[in-house]
Image (spheres, helix red, strand yellow):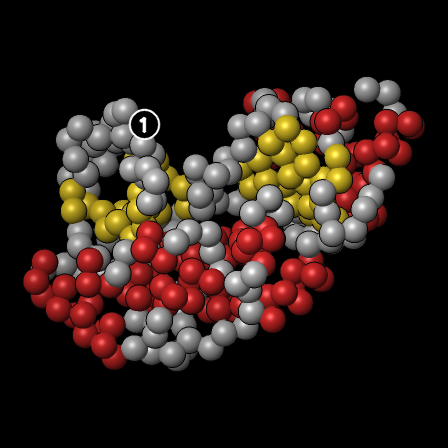
Amino acid sequence: MELQYHQSAFELIGKVPIFSEDANAVLDQLEQRYEFRFPASLREWYSIHNILEMFFKYSWGDPVEFVQVEKLIPKKIADENASARRYRDARLIVFKTALESDCQWAILLDGSDDPPVLFEDDTAPPSWEPIASSFSEWCYSEIRFWLDDPNEMRDWQFQRESEQSRVWRHQHSSWLLTAYDSVSNRDLDLLRQHFQQGPLTRPSEARFFFQSATGDQQLVLDDNRWFLWAQTEESLLQLTNFVWSCGNLAEKLHDVGDHYTDIPQRLRASRPY
């Protein structure tokens, strides 16, 4: 099956997509029943055999969080939603819902073939906010983020990886520092000037994702925690040097990677903070 929108996502995990006639037939029936057309990127994704089972293996979330193909139904944004005015008369298709909250992920039916993804949190009143410029970008970033993810649930996720992903992770996730510290607007301005900012695939778990132009350095940030990741210790040293003055990282950074590094101790001995 040749993909137009999601080929890069499948290349990340080394899988070959297989077309599902049954899923495609369901999509046809939904279009006829609700008199609309699925965006090409969403239709391509859901036309792949066992796509939700596959996606579960390479992304965060429980399988039941992802909406089954027969439940992909367009709906209007509720009037009580804080974003109703911004997206007046717009329709959405929700494709993921969180099990333990009222959070939802949806595509905006704006007429494009690869529409943006919106996220609705569980605050009051709820509000839809854009988190990715396209559905294909969201899918790719969700998989890439999971493969790179350095947080404390990594060991649990590791148990259900394929052998190929285990090798990939071993080769690419060795050097890691973390710190519990807040993120200021000054810090964000600095990072945006020097790194590429990626989409927020899971706003409830991470607020910001940055990576270098070559992809060998990455930063994942939420309200109170930083993760610094690099492919080599030398690259991690360069990254740590760059963010050393951000917040209280100079005092709080510590090693949590596969390979021990004393970069924080070395920098504290050589640089004032």
Image check: 117 left or right of 187? left
Q: Position of residue 54 (x, y in %)?
A: 42, 67
In the displayed structure, does residue 201 sit left or right of residue 14? left
- Amino acid type at mark 1: Thr
Residue 50's quadrant in the figure? bottom left
Name above or below for residue 131 compared with residue 32. above
- Quadrant of the frame with the C terminus: top right
Q: Residue at x 66, y 53 (%)?
A: 215
249 with respect to 135 (left or right): right
Quarter of the view holding residue 1: bottom left
- Front in this rendered view, residue 50 or 108: 50
- Residue 254, given in percent of the width and then of the height, sits at 75, 35
Q: Position of residue 147 (x, y in %)?
A: 57, 57
Residue 62 seen in this snapshot: yes
Residue at left offset 56%, top offset 69%: 162
Label 1: how many Cα within 10 Å (few below 14, some 14–19, many 20+): few
- Name the element at disc 1: loop
- At a point 17% along the width and 28% down the height, the residue shown is 80
List the residue tagged with mark 1. Answer: 123
Q: Is residue 161 left or right of residue 74?
A: right
Q: Position of residue 259 (x, y in %)?
A: 79, 51
Which residue does the image show at 56% across and 47% down from the upper left? 153
Q: Residue furthest top?
A: 273
Residue 9 drawn above or below residue 141? below
> In the picture, residue 31 is in which quadrant?
bottom left
- In the rendered image, is residue 113 in sight? no
